[in-house]
Each structure stands twice: as C-alpha cells, then as structure tokens.
Image: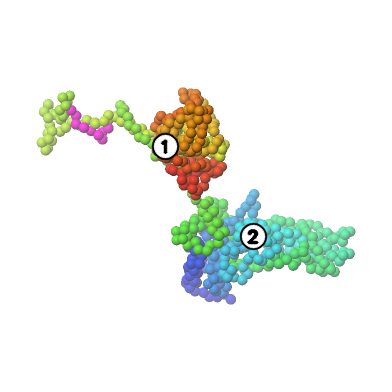
Amino acid sequence: MKVKYDSAQLQDQISSTCINLIMEDAFFGHFLLSINRELSEDGPTLWVRPSDDDKVIMGINPDFWSTELKGKNFRMGGIKHEVLHVVFKHLTRAQERLGGRLRYSNHKLFNIAADLVVNQYVERNWLIEGAVKLELFPDLNLRKEMDVSYYYDKLNDFHKEQMENLPQQAQGSGECPNCGESLGEKSEGSGGGDGESEGSGGGDGEESEDGESEGSGGGDGEESEDGESEGSGKMQCPHCGEDISEGEGKGEGEGQGEGTGGGSGSSESWSNLQSQFSQGPGARGGYHGFWGELDQSTESQREVLEEWVDRQIVNAVNRLDSTNTWGDLPGSLKDYLKEFMKTRKPKVDWRRNLRLFTENSQNTYLSNTLKRPSRRYKKIAHWPDGSPMYETKKGVPVKDGNGNFIPVWVPKYPGLKVRQRSSLLVAIDTSGSIRTDEDLPKFFNEMYHLQKKQVEILVVEVDEWIQRIYPFPLPEGQIEVKGRGGTDYNELIKYANGEEIDRSGTTASYQRGHTYSKAAGITVWEKGNWVAKESIKLNKQIDGIVYFTDGQAATPLEASKLPILWILAGIGVIDENSKSYNDLPGQKVKIED
C-alpha cells in the first residue's frame, strides 16, 4: 500500500537533508547544489539519470523516502551514495566500449561493482540494510578504494570461475551464467533433459561406479564408456551472446546429490553474489535502471554530459578551497579530486605566449619619408628673413574678427614612417634532456613563423657555456644543435647584457667555478662561414631573451637587463610547483606533451 505524501513537506525534508550534508560532508553538499531533484514513482528508490538538457537529475521515490529512509543519517547516506555515482562518472562508464563492444557487458555485475566503490565513502551508520560492502566477498581479497573497473573485473572473473560447472543449473533457473539476465520461463535449447540429478548435468546419465552421476548438458545422449551422458547442441544468451550450453556438472550419491559448483557450494562470497543477483531493482538502496538511457544517446551527448559533470566537480572543489571547508574527506578521494583538477587545469598555449612576448618586446622606430607631411603637428611659416608669414589679400595682410593677423601654418614634421621591429636572442639549451626529435622541431617551427613576421632572431646554442652563435634561419639549411653537456644560464645572460665573453689565454676562470680550456672557443657564423673565436661581445640591440630549456639547472646568479621568457620542455622538465620553477626570473611557460 502506497503512503500518501505531502510534496511540499517532502521537499522541505530533502532540502534539510542537503543542508545537513553540507555541514557533515561539504564537498558532496556543494556538488548537490548543481543537481536538480524530482519526486517521482518512475524508480523504486533513489536514482540519478541524464536529463533532457544533457545534465544529471536526481530522482526520489516518495514512498521509499518516507518508509525506508526515516532517519537523518539514512537520508544523507542515500543522497551521498547517488552523488558519488555522479562524481565517479558511473552513468557514462556503464556504456564504455572497447573495440566496439561493451566494456561492462554484465550489467548486474557493474551495478554491484559501482556500489562497492561508492559505499566505501559513505559512513557505515548511513547505509541501509542490504547495502553492498567489501566484506560480502571475503574470498576475493578485494583492495579498498579502487575504481569500478577493478571491482568489476574481480567479480566477473570470480563469477565465470564459479559458473564453469553450472551452466545447466543456470539454464534451469532462467538466468544467463555470464550476464545474469533472464532467459525466459524456459530456455530453448537441447539441454535440460529428464534426469533427476540436482547437479549441473541434468541429463539421463546413469550412476557411475564411484556413485557420481555426470551429465554434460542434458538431453537424451548416449552413455559413454566412462559413465558420462553427453548431450549435443548449443544455446546463446540473447543479451550478451555468450555460449551457455557448454559445461560439466556433478551430482553426488544416488544420482540425486546436490551440485557443488566446483567446490563453491559453501563459499560465502558465492552465496552473497548469488543473493545480490536475485535481489530486485533498487534493493541495495540505489536504482541504476536509468543508466542504460545513455546507450541510446550519441557520443557527443555523452561528452556534453561528462563535461557538465566535470564543471560541477571543479565548482565544488573551488568552493571548498575558497572557504577552507575540506573537512574529513578521505585521503584517497582527495587524491582523486586533486588529480582530476590537474587534468582540468587549462593548458597554456606556449606559442601564443611566445608571440605575445615578441610583440611586447617590440621597439618603435620613426624615419623621414617622401610621404605627405603629418597634419597633426604644425608651425607658423616664416619668410627668409625670419619674420612670420600671414595670410594676405591683394598684398595686404588679413585680420580676423578680433583684429589679429591670420598666420600661415605649415607642417612641423616631414612625412614619417613608423616601423616596429623586434630583435630576439633565442637561447637553445643543448643539454641531453632536450629531445631533439620532439621538442626542438616544435620550437624551430615556431621560430620560422616569427621570422616571417620580420622578427630578427639571433640563436645561441648553450649548455654549460656558449657553443655557437648564428642568425636564424641559417643559409646553409637544416640546423643541427651542438653541445649536449650540462646546463648553466649565467654566461648566456652575461652575453645578452652586453658583457664580453673572453676565453683567451691558457685557461679562463668563471665565477661559478667552471674552467675552460683554450680549445673551448665559440663558433660564430660570419659572412657565410663558421669562425672560431676566443672572445665575443654582442654588438647589436636586443629587445628580449627567449630561453628554450628543461629548467634543470641552478638559478642564475646573473641578473638579466632584458625581459626574458623561459620556454620549458624536455624529458625531465621541472614541475610548476617546484622551487626551481618559481626562482626563474621572468615569464615562464611549458610545452605540454
């Protein structure tokens, strides 16, 4: 008998429960603010489902809410359970496909696995009787706080193992041993003979010498020499397509012994799993019957739904950060949310940063041209003797209404040409961690684009010290970087600051303890040839430095006089939260893989 309910009163109770959840578990309460709710008898308990506008809506059966979820804790537990399904994206994961086939073909097992995931994050005294817990399956040694794929695979392997010797018994029960779906009142196949053995055989095989009656699939097959009765024919499950007619069962005693299912008859895990299969929809508290609606939607609709869920997670986490109300959220769930936030962090377009840096480093140059003079700036014209020139009429100066002479105006400046030019010094870290086959081609390709926009580029290859200097692009063709040693920023910054780099003499000491041999000269491209030099000095104006490196070096001691942009890439590129990253002077941007 259905309980009559007052809609307004139930809505107040639900709102009160949501407020309680915010106080107890702030993250779930904040997340819940974005989910619309409906009172409906479409489902038997509580559920979440995709809405018509590609969002998620929570449904609550009024009868279930009023009769089964009477206590405050049970109500918070039921709502938290559903929110967790959304956070872990079980709605969309249920429809995952691999190679065109459903990743989770056994829907009942997926539902159990999904409940195993979320119920670990719900307080025990918030769970209703019959809720799925890890301890229901002691034989499986399930690890805590894993994702749905882990529990599904464990349960699926266990289920298949147990069902290997029970196909005919499963057929008799009208359920597929693989997916657990109903096969109808009676399976149409060649199995299921007239034998009375309660083992998984069920055929007319006679008792063998050791007292066991065996049958391989039922039917009126002839008895083999070893006492086995063999049946023929196969049957496929209409839901998952698996063959459910093959297998071998055993019955003990006078042909009427109870089947052991491969020794699993006494298994607590197997009994509990069978019990879960036999329960009706929503018996464990949450109803998953609407998740299949996504299977009828397009890929783009599922992507939109996932994007909406992602945004709600981000909003909830941001609220927790702003109010510092993380509370006692389990460590594993915090880790999940932090990793999720990293994936949602917008990736900075390093190319755009490079172009903006180049534009901001431009200098403006003015030059006289034969163009029409500027009309903005003017002065009074003068006669050759230096006296001012006034407007005249028939050789007589003209006065204005105030009695003043009217001057003759001429342009103050001749025609001007405004030219913006940017000249960059681009340092290429040639240390071993920069990938010449992946990172350098990306960077050089962007340099070609800058060069086409009239950006003058001077390339300096540098590891622990400067190796080569040349304009970009090189007339001789493809660039092949030299060096591949360690990394030191100081000599490059000194060179960009206009200081002379001198390696003359037998040895030359450097402030950080480096010592160079006389042979360690610097190769420079001059007048179409490579020239080795012992000392160099920058003799042109540079507007900015772009340093392409992995960041794996000590913080530079030299202070740059020019703006500098660090473009970070490579195998061991430094982390954005590291001290090395924060200590680098100037702007920084990473090339994301």
Q: Nearer the viewer, residue 276 or 583?
A: 583
Residue 225 in the figure: left or right of residue 97: right
On screen, residue 86 above or below 16? above
Task: Give the structural element (helix, strand or loop) at label 2.
Answer: loop
The structure residue drawn at horizontal position 73% and vertical position 59%, both measured from the top left corner, is: 161
Q: Is residue 417 visible?
A: yes
Frontmost of labels 2 and 1 is 1
Task: Judge from the rendering whether residue 382 lies leftward or rightward of residue 23; answer left or right.
Answer: left
Residue 143, given in percent of the width and then of the height, sits at 64, 60
Queried whether the magenta region covers residue 436, the answer comes back as no
Relative image position of residue 558 (x, y in whole percent): 44, 39
Classify residue 63 by image quadrant.
Answer: bottom right
Instruction: Give, as a single range, the part of the protein colored magenta.
Output: 374-382
| Quarter-of-image position of residue 287 | bottom right
Residue 419 against residue 253 in the figure, above or below: above
Q: Amino acid at mark 2?
A: Arg
- Asked whether 500 or 580 is in front, the reply is 500
Please name the residue that numbered disc 1 is placed on. Answer: 544
Residue 164 point in image, percent of width and height: 75, 59
Describe the element under mark 1 as helix, strand or loop.
Answer: strand
Give the percent coordinates (x, y) of residue 467: 51, 31
State the residue at coordinates (49%, 25%).
Answer: 531
Q: Quadrant of the C terminus?
A: top right
Mark toward the start of the polypeptide (2 vs 1): 2
Q: How many marks?
A: 2
Q: Residue 143 — which label? A: 2
Residue 111 seen from this side: no
Q: In the image, what residue occupies the spot 53% across and 56% down?
A: 337
